[in-house]
Amino acid sequence: GQQVMQIPQYQHVQEGEDFTTYCNSSTTLSNIQWYKQRPGGHPVFLIQLVKSGEVKKQKRLTFQFGEAKKNSSLHITATQTTDVGTYFCAGRTGNQFYFGTGTSLTVIP
Amino acid sequence: DADVTQTPRNRITKTGKRIMLECSQTKGHDRMYWYRQDPGLGLRLIYYSFDVKDINKGEISDGYSVSRQAQAKFSLSLESAIPNQTALYFCATTRTGGTEAFFGQGTRLTVV
């Protein structure tokens, strides 16, 4: 069954507001990746986190990996309409990546 | 040209028909994957292959089969399609020891 859960499933924000999606695994992960899928598109890799407690930033995006390596978050500061899409985490256990259920972000201009 | 190419992009088929989805890649990666995407369920792994002679079942392999014809080609077959196999299917590749997965453009399959 699904090992990686994401919340929320949907999020609508006004442009300029912040957005956060959370990813939780039932098992300890070797690493975690984040992907973005634009409407009608395919998932595109954003970043990988490996170390316990790791924090990485890409412009307005901040990614965190939990101390226990079972959870992760993606935070977007001051959303823009270009941030629209579905954000997936993918946690690695053994040789497989298990994708989260995804968070669909809508940004209202 | 896309590095990971899926054909067809869209397909409507009838219940009980056999259908094959094809994936080819020019990235030179060893590892290839097939996922299906359903609303609210994310991406679920169907099958994966780490090299030409290696085939492994994923989370939801029942009703599907695959063939790794060459390093660059990985096909997914539905032997007898059923309506609940209606979904968006993605092929992906990774390099052994690599980090990111590269996805194809997807195949939207509808079984009526």
Image (tube, grey):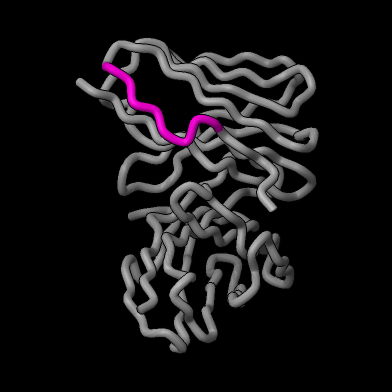
Pick the front one: B11 or A12:
A12
Span highlighted in magenta in the image: A7-14
Pick the front one: A17 or A81:
A17
Location of residue A4 with respect to B44 vertically, above or below:
above
Residue B27 in the magenta stretch? The answer is no
Percent x, y for residue B66? 60, 75
Taking the spot 73% from the left edge, 72% from the top edge, the residue there is B53
B7 lies left or right of B69? left
Q: How many marks?
A: 0
B94 lies left or right of B13? right
Taking the spot 67% from the left edge, 63% from the top edge, the residue there is B49
Image quarter (top left, top right, bottom left or bottom right) of the C terminus of chain A: top left
Taking the spot 53% from the left edge, 22% from the top edge, the residue there is A74
Percent x, y for residue B47? 64, 65
- Quarter where residue B70 is shown: bottom right
Location of residue A17 with respect to B33 vertically, above or below:
above
Percent x, y for residue B111? 39, 76
